[in-house]
Amino acid sequence: MRRNLSLEFALALILALPAPAAAVRVSGLTARPFHGQTFLTWSSPPGTGWSYHVYRATTPPQGGGISHYALVGSVLDSTWCDRRCSSLIGYSYSYTMPDGSHLAAGQGLFVNTPGAAATAWYAVTCDSATVPADTVTVPGVNATASGVLEIPDRPQPVWQRKLTVARVTGDVYTLWTSDHDSPWFPEMCNRPSIPYDCAVVPGAPGGWQALMFYPHVRGGNFLSLTNGTGTPGEWVLTMDDYMPTAEGNTFWFGYNEGFDITARSNSTPTSGFVVDYTMRRVVFTLEWARSTLPIDTTRVYAIGYSMGAIGALFTTLRLPDLIAGAMFAHGVFDFGFEADPDAACSFNPSGAQRWSCDHLFGTVQEDLPTPEGERTFDVLDANYLVKELANAGRAVPPIVSFSGRYDTTTGWAEKPIFFRTMHSTREGGMFFFDTSTHNGGALSAWAPMGNFGYVYRYRSDRSFPALSNCSTDLNPGDGHAASGDSVGTINGYVEWDTTTIVDSRLVWGIRLTLRDLATRWGTLRAPDSLSVDVTPRRLQQFRIQPETPVQYSLTDAGGVLFASGAALSDAHGVVTIPAVTVRRSGTRLALWQLPNNSGVRAAAVDGVTLSGLVNPLHGACRFEVAWPRSGAGRVEVLDVSGRRVRRVWSGVASAGPQSERLDATGLASGVYLLCARQGSAVTTRRFVVVR
């Protein structure tokens, strides 16, 4: 018999090779639902280098194989460990689960956010570069023995621990994000089950119980700014914008959907959506803090420096109804601007910051789309966002900004453009500029003005005057460092009394004042008076009809009228009072939406009419009020703040005209309202008392 030597040699070679590694199986898989998320934990096999794959089924699995399940996502080793916090502190911290238990070293964790209510079964397999995945599922080992009921809900950051950093003690929370949208939870990462830490420093008893959102600088972290401003009652919320990539951070915005947050190096994307993953997480966390913490929800603020200023500004423009006010220094207003005359500007082409932007967002020239249908460098342009708010008749919250002409990190030339945008949209803002560099805050001319606690004077439930065309504004120039005034401010000399604002259905009033400004070299004294255009913003009760005349008056500190007039509201019901004279002693501005016809006859409002009123009034006069029906009524004199100063008549009226007498004796010179009411029917006439 002839022997097949070739076949024998092949068989011998095969037998001599090492046997393939046996599949390895995780054990102890558990699934626990918590606020719309399911926390899966398991015991990992020994060693490192494992990849874990999570599967889910919505019908009872059959046959003990993985084919019945659908892949949900994958994670790597050491998911039991809060790596970010551990690396910052230098101590290994394990994650705390919603039930208060702590994961042990060697356990695995995956947090799934289902999109709909269901009973779900889970399985987990693992593999490595040398060990294949085990496709056999064993209930109670690497698969859940029974289904878990999942009900969509708003996920919650999970409390982890108390930490003391720089003598400040705060609570650390972790939010596990998702790579898909669900009814209560937007997609916040392009990978599943990615954890992000935040810290909350409770406010001391007393004070305002305000919440300060304090985003960190580029290269910073969520533990670096927990000291806040030191204002009594202040709560501080810090978050983390971090990736273990060469780009390091997302500028508090996000990145292209194809960006690999685990890779050391990424290339510039040329397709796909740019998603605001980070901003979505900021918004979600702020809304969670606002609804969970015992704070005054009308006192939520944003502050920051450098990249933190970017976070503060763009969060404010994203949440203009939630943020009461913002204050920041040396940020960026327009990420698409790359034409700074200073060749050293880092956001110019080939600059270090532009390199990161290109990798995160794609190039300015490509201008990739966002999932919402806008272009990336529109939503990364504060000018665009401000114009969008203005076009909708909405207010940009009060903002205070500091910029340096020789700031080559974030640039200078784009800053005057934003100043002009805020001016042209009548959104106001208070801006300071000087010859400082990016890291020269202590050497800035305006350093004494940089107390971020200043924003606590604003509230989201309180209207404010947006200022423009201030006569003391200095010239920021054309974007060249040497152009314009080297040190200056826009609207910086004007303030207002935040505690005496009148915002009623009938009248809006505010007391404008002047303030001196502190610099490193001394005090810049405000002039005795100045002029400024005033646009009432964030109105609460006073509603202005579109394209309607609005009357106004100006009175001095003694209540003496020195100017009055009318202005026309725009299509959104926004009105600007031009050239308001503000005196050092204070000026009271009051607005009414009333016809100005010298008292000959007034139009009917809700069926009530007033006529025959003499205006201006030197002594006494008779007037006529026509009631729409029989019933209780009253006629009163109100001051410009809406406070009653005299009752003219009250009683049961008969339908039709009624003659009454108005005597101005005892009333100081100034502007008043004659108001007639009968149930919900009301009309008001302005008149001026002259002595």
Image: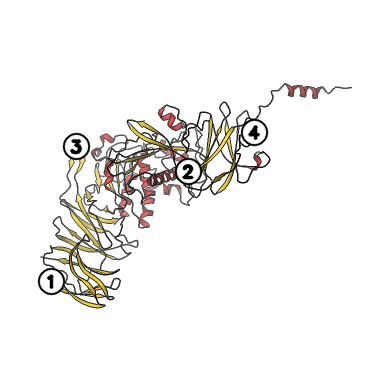
Q: Nearer the viewer, residue 65 or 477?
A: 65
Residue bearing mark 1: 620
Whichever of labels 4 and 3 marks the residue nearer the N terminus, that label is 4
Residue bearing mark 4: 134
Asked if the residue at tag 1 contacts the one at tag 3, i.e. Cβ–Cβ closer than 8 Å, the answer is no
Res. 32 visible in picture: yes
The span from disc 2 to disc 1 (Cα, nearest Å) is 69 Å
Asked if the residue at tag 4 contacts the one at tag 2, i.e. Cβ–Cβ closer than 8 Å, the answer is no
Label 2 secondary element: loop
The span from disc 1 to disc 4 (Cα, nearest Å) is 98 Å
Res. 362 visible in picture: no
Whichever of labels 3 and 1 marks the residue nearer the N terminus, that label is 3
Give the amino acid type for the residue marked by disc 4 in the picture: Asp
The span from disc 2 to disc 4 (Cα, nearest Å) is 31 Å
Classify residue 159 by image quadrant. Answer: top left
Q: Residue 658's spot in the image, x, y percent?
A: 21, 77
Give the amino acid type for the residue marked by disc 1 in the picture: Ala
Whichever of labels 1 and 4 marks the residue nearer the N terminus, that label is 4
Whichever of labels 2 and 4 marks the residue nearer the N terminus, that label is 4
Q: Which tag is nearer the camera, tag 2 or tag 4? A: 4
Q: Residues within 10 Å of mark 2 (few under 14, many from 20)?
A: many
| Relative side of 130 to 317, left or right | right
The span from disc 3 to disc 2 (Cα, nearest Å) is 47 Å
Q: Which mark is residue 521?
A: 3
Asked if the residue at tag 1 contacts the one at tag 2, i.e. Cβ–Cβ closer than 8 Å, the answer is no
| Relative side of 651 to 133, left or right | left
Q: Which mark is residue 188?
A: 2
Q: Which mark is residue 396?
A: none
